[in-house]
Structures are given as structure tokens and as C-alpha cells.
Amino acid sequence: MSDWRERADASLDWLVEATAVQRIAVSSMALVFAVLVGAVLVFVSGFVADCPDPFILLPGLGYGCYNPVEVYATMVGGAFGSFAALGRTLQEMTLLLFTGLSVAVAFRAGLFNIGTQGQMVLGALAAALTVLSLGEVVPENALGTLIVIPAGVVVGAFVGGIWGMIPGLMKAYADAHEVITTIMLNFVAMGIAFWLVQNHVGNLETDSVQTHTVPEVARLPATIDGSRFSLYALVGALVAAVGIYFLYTRTVLGYELRTSGVQEAAAEYGGVNAKRNIVTSMTLSGALGGVAGAIYVTMVQYRWQDGIPPLGFDGIAVSILAGNNPLGVIPAALLFGGMKSGSVAIDLSLGVPNELVEVLRGLIILFIAMPELFRMIGKRAGYGGEPVATDGGERDGKSAGGEVKPEPDGDGADRSARDGSDGGEGR
Amino acid sequence: MDGSAETPEPGVGSERATPWGGEEPPAVHLEGITKRFPGVVANDDVDFTVDRGTIHALVGENGAGKTTLMNVLYGLYEPTEGTVWIDGEARTFSDPADAMAVGIGMIHQHFMLVDTMSVAENVVLGDEPKKWGGLATDTARAVEETRELAERYGFDIDPTERIEEISVGEQQRVEILKTLYRGAEILILDEPTAVLTPQEVEVLFEVLEGLIAEGKTIIFITHKLGEALRAADEISVLRDGRLVGTVPAGEATEERLASMMVGRDVILEIEKPPSTRGSALLRVDDLVVEDDRGVTAVDGVGFAVHTGEIFGIAGVDGNGQTELVEAITGLRPVESGTITFDGLEVTGTPRRRRIEAGMAYIAEDRQKRSLVMEYDLRRNGLLGCQRLPAFSDGWRIDWGRTDAYVEDVITEYDVRPPNAAAIARSLSGGNQQKFIVGREFERDPSLVVAAQPTRGVDIGSIEFIHDRLLELRSDGKAILLVSSKLDEVSQLSDRLAVMHDGEVVAVVDPESVTEEELGLLMAGERPTGLDTEEARTERTETPRGGGGGGR
């Protein structure tokens, strides 16, 4: 009993103290294991499926339909195997970068923005309407594009920002938890957008709920044939990632934003208007969601159409996988983008059901996220680092700052708190 | 000194079987306990013995290893080395349930009670009397059994009341009943008095004596020496994970225990170096402040704090000190009246301006205000300083200078562990406070507002913080010291204001005022013939309008 516990203690210490290189190595190992487990799963599932041309016959078991090697090869090939595939991957990655950053910005500031999807939907609509109206007046050349697209992005960011500001205001001044309000506002955003497009601003000549298609001048030029990926958008996303990284590590504003979200009372002590900063963080987060929407319209869909893919929700997973580090969002978005285009390829070329492909993707995310998750838990519980206060640190009952963060107890350093039972607990 | 280990006698006709060999084995004997955590030795070869039917106090500074040692005894940790003997038998516990089975119960500082359930339900929780073949809890029997138990030990408690309706002291007794219900013979209490009022402490000690009379054995952890002397039969002192010694309470003094705890002589009396009082730096006039509920908490307070002096504010907690301090430091709006700092009115200016003007602040609630618990010390070192020219240009943080500053604070103020990457939460209370004090003082402030600067801090750090405050005073800084520890404010302050119900009752000379007079003032009464400041200024030359207390 104590043996496994000591080993668990030691592992958590190691994880918390691991260097960046070690962490990347751990994640890579996790990826290998995820593929192995997934391969077994695919292989076994093949025996209960029906197919015209099984690839293997095992005596006593019957025909196996799916070849795991082929499945994974198709996934990788579909993601990176050709220029067109790479283009589709990068296209997806660009969008996920923006939504992932949107979530990470809020996370870094101690706020959970689950509303990126709604912010993106409204930002996309605002951007679509902007470029549609501007597209009629600007010259149809590169100069026109240079005017229309930035305008669309700015308006998208503005509207997304407003939609993020609302839960920020509710959090700061009415004590409404942002998880609840952002989730609810997602539905409101989708409802508003649907209603507007269906009844007022959409293309009323079609039955489907969509706007008119934006003119050529309002489209980001495709960089790679066979996909709609535009390098300009990717560069913009990368600049945003680096900028946000610097914001939070090097600037006073970033420090104050983060402190306000993490521990409001301490921020006030430090001479910061914590409430205003909570609103600022949420607005910034929402603006990035809005930009994602604008890029979606100008790079991928060329119009606003009902049923925008759940990029905002994927952004949550991207951000968590990245440990909420703005730079980590880059590889995380690439992985997600690659898996997305890879699974489309499996779906198209192999008979493997889409649900099974989703399971494979889920396994990869689960395995890669797990070490980071344990790292976060270990850090919270006080593992790693130099000697721990063995006496439990400060125990002044009333001064535990626990109510500030959604976290069970303020007494993190005390190892006994983890076992937090009393002697008489008979289970 | 190497503890009070009984001289081992060779067992009759065989090798030594037990470490004592006498007739009656002690209730608890910890032999050579060492507990290591990665990177730290929490207990180092500790021998610890408690006889049946006695009260034993375990004292030590924060981080000395008291709690770890007791966690070993009650099965939460397995010792790295060493043996636990209970009633003469060697035991190994793999979890607290094992320890409970041989009669060891622990009462934690933070109670583990279900607020919405009754006393009786809490007492039997997890071990309920059943009815209908085990399908339901027999509440009537639970109440009856709790009542019997309470009566047997003389606890005044109603088993049917809900936890949220009873006082903290009563909740503690429920915790004790819980362990007794499970058949505990040895009770461990972790800092039982920390959450109690002085009256409740007395009741607790009576309860403990009642338990001893019934043959129970009690160990309690504390860092309040007076209480250890008052309640215990024997006192063991831990320092840096080692047992310094065990002394009978009758032979111990506070000074001796304190020096055992910190490993050197501690001067409990404070010697104030001479200082010259200068001009008034902070002036508060007719200040009215409301608390969070909108009730007037500070009602027309006025005083001035001069350079080169410590101006103390004494009073029972909750008489407006918190609101007063927050108004002065810029964390709470002022209803009426003015605050003047360094010749400028700052009544409505934001806190940032006041920091820039040289106001340092040690907040009363350090885990909520003065530290971001999740940040490392490096980031905490920036808190409040982030817009000062020495740390940033208002936009980009100068991490190089911040790191140098934090390193400096850590060395100068002896913060342990000396590691700027340590998370604030992982530090003990005393080290957290030393870091805060260092951060605020090294910024070279002109005014220091120190609210409860030594609350929950161990003795060694208290002495250190006091010395630093006196140093600042000698350097000609103005210090506003708010503390509910009467000896602290009266020993450190040059002038002492007593607050009651939002008003300054009087400003007195701490040298000449008696403790009885202070007690009366704190209760809101004015003893006759009191030598207050107003009386003195009237007696001497014409008043210059400085420092008038009250109204």
C-alpha cells in the first residue's frame, strides 16, 4: 500500500519538476501508447464488422475487416501525405489556433470561457455582413482585399469581444459564474444569429439559413491548391500566439490581468482594478473567438451558414492539451487539425465507421492530455519543488484564500489534506 | 537533552523485547521515528513517550514537524524508520482506520462535520446504529447514545441541534465525541485552541481534564506556550524535525520553552531603541467608513501618525480596525472625513497612487490579500510593485530587477525555503509573512501600515518582524500598527489608540497605562484618572492640533 503510494508521490514530483524537453518526451510516449491501444481496438472491432473484402482470417475468430496499420497510415497520410492534405490540416489548425488562444487567454487569467463558440458564431456573422457590404464598394483588386478583410476581422473581433464582455461584466459586478453564463450565452448567440439570418440579413432566396456568398475580393487567397488554407491567416494566428505569450509573461498588463482572475482580493491589494481586468480578459478572449469566426468566413465558408462546426468547443480541448500555454496551443492545434483531416480521409477511403475514428482521436487526446492533467493536479497538491512545509503551512482557519478559485480547499501544501479524512471514518 | 526516554532495563532472561521493560507500558511510545519526504526530513529520530492518563503538549514552530509526527501516530503516514508502540505493543498502521482500531483518534484543527446534520448524526456518521435490518439509521438510538456519552464526560451539548447552529467550541466538542464514540483511548488534538475564544479555551481545558479523569490519554499540538503550561502535564518540544526535549509542565517556564523552540534565547520583552518623533505623515480626520454590509464600522475617527514613531491601534477584533486600515490603504471607500498622506489629501485616490506615494501595507489576511497563493515568490514579489519605476516602465516588466529584488528579500528576511520558484502556498505561515514584510519594507516606504503582522506566525518570526518594525521606526518612517495582541501593541507602540465600536476611545501612553485600564478601554469604558493624550496636551503647552484621539 505504501509502496505504490510512495511511487505515486515520486512520479508526481517528477512530473511537476519535469523540464520542457522531458514533458515533450512524455507526451510523445503517450502518443505511441495511444496508437498502440487504438490499433488493438481497431483490429478487434474488425472481427465484429461485416465487409466485402476482409484483410485477415484468423482461425476460430473469423474475418477481420480493419487493418490497424492501414488505418493509421491513412490518418497520417490524410493529414500530411500530400500538399492538399497538408493544406486541409493547416486550414483547420489556423482556426483552432484562434479558438484555442481564445480559451487559453481566459484560462491564464483564471477564467473559464466556455463561450468561444458563441463569440465565434456572432463574430463570423458580423464579419460576413461587413465584407458583404464593403465588397460592393471597394475596387476588386488586392487593395480591395487589403481593406475588406482587415475590416471584417476587426468587426468580428469587436462583436466577439462584446459577446465576451457580457459574461465578464456579469462575473465582475454580479458575481455570476462565467462557466454558466458563457454556456448559456452560446445558445443565445446561436439563436440570435439564426433569427437574423433567417429573417433579416440572410439570403432570402434560398431555403437554407445562410447569407449571400462573399465576393472574391473578400476571400483570403488560398496558398495551397486543393484546400482553402491561407498562409496569411496562419501567420496572423502565430503572431497572436506569440503576442499573448508575451502579454502574460512580460507585461504589467498581463500580470495584472492574470492576478485579477486568479485572486481578486490580492490584485486589489496590489493596486489593480480587479473587476475591470476580469472584464478585459473576457473581452480579449471573446475578441479572439470573433476573429476565429471572421477567418472562418473569409477563408473557409465564404458566407455565414447555419451549422458552424464546433471549433469553439474544440478550442477548449486544444487549450487544455497545451496546458493553457499560448505557445503550446500551436502544436496542440496542429495535432487537432491533423487528426481532423486525417479522420476525414479514413472516413472517405476506408470502410471504418466514423464513430470508431472518433474513438481513435479521443484516445490520442486522452493519452496526451493525461500527463499534463496529472501535472496540474500534482502542482495543485503541492508536489515538486523544494521542501514542503511539513507542518501544513499556514493553518489560520479563516484566512484560507480558497473561495477565490473554484478549488476544493485552500490548504494545498499540506499533504495530509489530500487524505483529508479523520480517524473515525469507517468505510 | 535527549528526551525523557526511560532507562531501558534488560528484560528478564531474554534480550530486550520492549524499550521500557517496566511494569506498566506507556500509552504511546514512539521510538526513533524518522519520516522523510522527497527533499525534506520532517521527523528525525524522534523518541516520544506519553503515559496513560496524562495530557501531553507537543510544541514547536511552524514546520517543526509536529503535525507530521502525529500523522505518523495516527496512521496517516508510515514512518520511514522507527516503531510505534501502543500500550506496549509494536504497531504498524497503514491508514487511520488501523489506528482507530487500537483506540487512537485525531481531532483536526479544521472540523470535519456536516453542517446541516444534527450533533448526534455527526457523532455516529460512518458507524451508525441501524434499524430495519440495516436499511436505515436508528436516529433515536443515535441521539440517546450521544446523550449518554456527553453526560458521561460532562459535555454540555444537545444532540439534536444542528452543527450550523452551535458555536465553534461546541463543534469541537462534537469532534471529540465523535472519536470517543469510536472507542478512542488516546486523543490527538491539532492546535485545538486556534479557533476558540479565551472563554472557550477554558471550557476545553476543563473537558480535557474530565477525559483524563476517565483514564484517557491526550496529546495536543500547539504553539502557544502559555496554554501548554496551563493544561499539560508534560511538554515536548520539537525543532527542525528533532525532539529537543520533554519537560514536566511544573518545571518549565515560557522563556525556557521558547528558547528550546527556536534554539536560542528569545527576548520576550521588547527593547525599544530611542527614536525622534518628527512631523505628522498620515492624518485621519473624522473618518467614517462602512463595512461590507453597509453598516457604519468606523465612526468619526481622527488621529495622526508621525515619522519616527509607531502608532498602535489596540482593540478587540471587529471594532472597525479592519475597515479603518482598508480605508487608509485605499481598498475601501470612505463615506466622509479625510485622509491626508504626506501633505496631500488621498481620501479618494486609488490604491495604486498611494503605493506610488510610498505607502507599504501588511494586510491582516495574508492568504487572501498580500500573497497570490498560486504564484511563486518571484511573481509575488511583484505584487503591488508592478507599476513602480524600479520594476517596470508601466508596460513591460523588468524581470531581471524583479528577480534581484526577490532574491534580496529572501536572503535579507531569511525566507525558507530560499527559493524564488517556490509556490507561496507551500510556505509556512511565518515564512509567508517574512516574505511579505520583506517585499513591503525593502521598497523603502515612508509609511508602513501593519495589520496583525504576527498573527499565526511562529515565535522566531515574530521577534524578527518586531525588530524590523523598530528598525524602520529608527530610520524615521511612520508606522501604523494594528494588532489584537495587547502585549504586542503596547510594547511596540509609542502612542496607543484603543478602538471600540468604530471609535477611538482614547489615545494613551503605553508606558504608563495599565493592562486593566486597557481592558476597560477595549470594552468601551473610560477609567477615571486615565492619563490620555488629550489630558496631557491640555496640561502642557498649547496643542499643535496633532494626534487628537476620539472626538
Image (tube, rainbow, N blue to C red):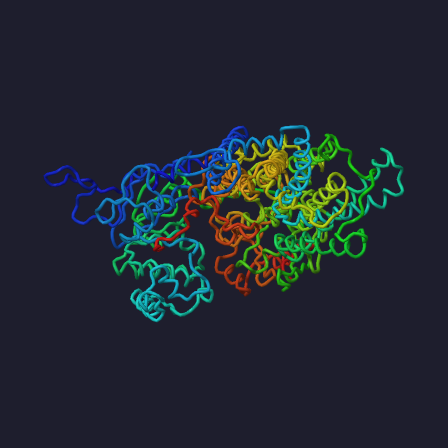
Tell whether B481 sits left or right of A300.
left
Q: Is residue B436 above or below residue B119?
A: above
Please identify the quadrant where the N terminus of chain A is shown: top left
A99 or B286, which is in the foreground?
A99
Kindly identify the residue that appears in the image at 30 percent across and 64 percent down: B153
Residue A296 in picture, x, y percent from top left: 72, 41
Count every numbered label the image shows and give the total: 0
Tell whether B282 sits left or right of B271.
right
Residue A340 in picture, x, y percent from top left: 62, 38
Question: Where is residue B273, by image quadrant?
Answer: top right
Kindly identify the residue that appears in the image at 74 percent across and 30 percent down: A223
Name, please, the residue furthest toward the front: A52
Tell whether B254 sits left or right of B386.
left
Kindly identify the residue that appears in the image at 39 percent across and 42 percent down: B65
A103 or B120, which is in the foreground?
A103
Residue B470 in picture, x, y percent from top left: 55, 42
- Residue B463 visible within the image: no
- Residue A180 visible within the image: yes
Residue B508 in picture, x, y percent from top left: 57, 56
Q: Is residue A336 above or below residue A417?
A: above
A203 or B520, which is in the foreground?
A203
A405 or A183, which is in the foreground?
A183
Please identify the quadrant where the C terminus of chain A is shown: bottom left
